């Protein structure tokens, strides 16, 4: 009898995981304690070293499309229809020389190519060949002011409820040699589904950091007053700002 | 000390008992939250990047109302258990593992990750604290399976199966216990820790050879899942043995430390 009770309780303990987890997850203090390790992971792992670079033969020819759908407003469809000649990448905020870059200007800057793996937070990964302007080259072109702390990427896509996608990196992450403003994927100009005309690539962190359809790069001292205040669209939904794990 | 009029021995020091029970808690949370994370991409590929051609396990729902589990390309209908399951909101839908065993008990990847990454620290620190204290006290010697134990494995199993009257001579732990503890504490636990680390793009950038050693990122995810499944197997055998070999004595010894030999 005792044995049966013991085994039954072991089995029901497993099946109780969901409901108990749900109840505890609703508690703010519990969530705060759980989130406390993010800072520790950020300090211990951080952004060090270089993501592995692959060979041409490793590339996924049909790179998986994920996240929000390409913007469907007339502003964006007009940009696509006219091959992005009217596109301007605005770089402003805590910078010495705010500037609006045309796509042609970005294409004339020294280009970098990387074949890196994109690790999605969902658990899948894909390898793409990305070319574009190293983010640090762009930041050097506009010059950072002394109060600059974070680089915020403002995007053209939204979640269907009007909330625009955005992301952010600190200056150390933004100056990482593989942080890239990609203009091309797999030897062709970015197509609308993959974030045309300019998207970010941050191969040392999870895929949601690699924002697509970037309209503006704003350098700030703090992102606390932007949208939900957590430094990114998914961060505002509870995902980690430090996405290196 | 005497229990029920017979001599008892102090078998488990406080740190062993505390780390054992904390590890049990972390084990449940890590499995529940890990299955939550798995549900976000319910495929396991023996490759670096995702690759359907090298898919070992896929749990999915080919049509509404149908759940399938595909192992090495062979599909099995698992409706209600895997693929098409209770979503925790009173409906059935296309979710790999059912809501009753995932943490939290509905689809929420970000919360699952928070639980998983927090309790990963708890489990790893528990294991490390136990390992260091046991190494200092010299208890590890009695637990680790040695080549000289190998010939005794079958005689011990034969004794359990009542094919043999006496167990082979052994120390505090018999050869089968040593085999179980060695595989869990020195093989499976390091495996799930290292494969978990290999999944992190930040750690991959620092220590790519670690990811490569497991066959790449998706392969590391497969090893991580397999390590979990083997630990669940150990858990099942372990609880069965505790339940069948003097449950009161066994539970008391892991709670108070005092074990009463036969």
Image (tube, coloured by chain):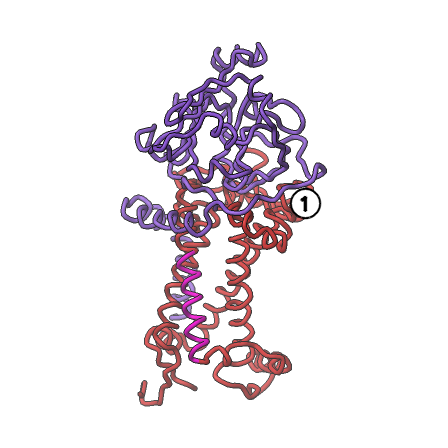
Q: Is residue B132 magenta?
A: yes
Kindly identify which chain the residue marked by label 1 belongs to: B
Q: Nearer the viewer, residue B151 or A245?
A: A245
Number of numbered discs on residues? 1
- The secondary structure that most of the magenta stretch takes on is helix
Question: Is residue B214 among the parts visible in the rendering?
Answer: yes
- Which one is nearer the viewer's eye here, B91 or B260? B260
Q: Is residue B180 above or below residue B37?
A: below
Q: Which chain is purple?
A: A
Percent x, y of residue B140: 48, 77
Looking at the image, which residue is at 52% across and 10% down? A78
Which residue corresponds to mark 1? B54
Asked if residue B170 lies left or right of residue A189, the reply is left
Image coords of residue A56 (percent x, y): 70, 36
Placement of the N terminus of chain B among the 4 image quadrants: bottom left
B26 to A178, vertically: above or below:
below
Residue stretch rendered in magenta on the structure: B121-137
Q: Is residue A62 left or right of residue B124?
A: right
Residue B117, position as x, y percentages in the image: 42, 51
Residue B81 seen from this side: no
Q: With B177 as the anchor, is A28 left or right in this view?
A: left
- Find chain B in the image and tell me its colour: red
Mark 1 is surrounded, within 10 Å at the Cα level, by few (under 14), some (14 to 19) or many (20 or more) other residues, namely some
Residue A75 in the image: above or below residue A36: above
């Amino acid at each position: 009898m005792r044995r049966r009770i013991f085994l039954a309780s072991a089995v029901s303990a497993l099946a109780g995981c969901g409901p108990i987890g749900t109840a505890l997850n609703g508690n703010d203090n519990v969530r705060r304690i759980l989130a406390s390790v993010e800072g520790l992971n950020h300090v211990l792992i951080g952004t060090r070293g270089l993501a592995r670079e692959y060979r041409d033969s490793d590339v996924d020819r049909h790179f998986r499309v994920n996240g929000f759908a390409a913007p469907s407003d007339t502003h964006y469809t007009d940009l696509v229809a006219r091959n992005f000649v009217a596109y301007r990448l605005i770089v402003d905020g805590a910078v010495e020389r705010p500037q609006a870059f045309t796509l042609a200007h970005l294409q004339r800057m020294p280009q970098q190519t990387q074949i890196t793996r994109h690790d999605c937070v969902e658990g899948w990964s894909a390898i793409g060949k990305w070319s574009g302007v190293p983010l640090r080259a762009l930041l050097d072109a506009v010059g950072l002011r002394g109060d600059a702390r974070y680089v915020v990427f403002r995007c053209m896509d939204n979640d269907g409820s009007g909330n625009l996608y955005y992301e952010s990196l600190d200056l150390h992450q933004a100056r990482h040699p593989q942080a890239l403003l990609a203009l091309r994927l797999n030897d062709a100009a970015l197509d609308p589904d993959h974030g045309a005309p300019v998207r970010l690539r941050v191969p040392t962190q999870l895929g949601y950091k690699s924002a697509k359809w970037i309209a503006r790069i704003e350098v700030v001292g703090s992102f606390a007053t932007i949208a939900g205040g957590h430094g990114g669209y998914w961060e505002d939904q509870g995902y980690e700002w430090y996405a290196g794990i | 000390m005497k229990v029920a009029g017979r001599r008892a021995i102090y078998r488990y020091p406080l740190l062993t008992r505390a780390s054992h029970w904390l590890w049990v808690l972390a084990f449940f949370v890590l499995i529940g939250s890990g299955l939550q994370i798995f549900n976000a991409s319910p495929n396991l590929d023996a490759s670096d990047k995702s690759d359907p051609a090298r898919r070992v396990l896929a749990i999915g729902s080919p049509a509404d109302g149908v759940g399938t589990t595909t192992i090495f390309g062979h599909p099995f209908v698992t409706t209600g258990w895997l693929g098409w399951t209770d979503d925790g909101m009173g409906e059935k839908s296309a979710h790999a593992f059912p809501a009753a065993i995932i943490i939290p008990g509905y689809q929420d990847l970000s919360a699952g990750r928070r639980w998983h990454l927090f309790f990963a620290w708890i489990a790893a620190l528990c294991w490390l604290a136990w390992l260091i204290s046991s190494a200092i006290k010299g208890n590890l010697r009695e637990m680790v399976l040695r080549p000289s134990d190998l010939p005794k494995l079958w005689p011990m199993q034969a004794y359990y199966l009542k094919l043999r009257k006496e167990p082979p001579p052994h120390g505090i732990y018999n050869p089968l216990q040593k085999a179980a503890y060695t595989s869990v504490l020195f093989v499976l636990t390091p495996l799930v820790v290292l494969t978990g680390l290999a999944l992190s793009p930040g750690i991959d950038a620092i220590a790519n050879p670690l990811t490569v050693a497991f066959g790449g990122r998706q392969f590391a995810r497969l090893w991580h899942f397999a390590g979990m499944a083997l630990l669940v197997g150990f858990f099942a055998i372990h609880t069965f043995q505790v339940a069948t070999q003097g449950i009161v004595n066994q539970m008391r010894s892991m709670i108070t430390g005092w074990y009463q030999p036969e």
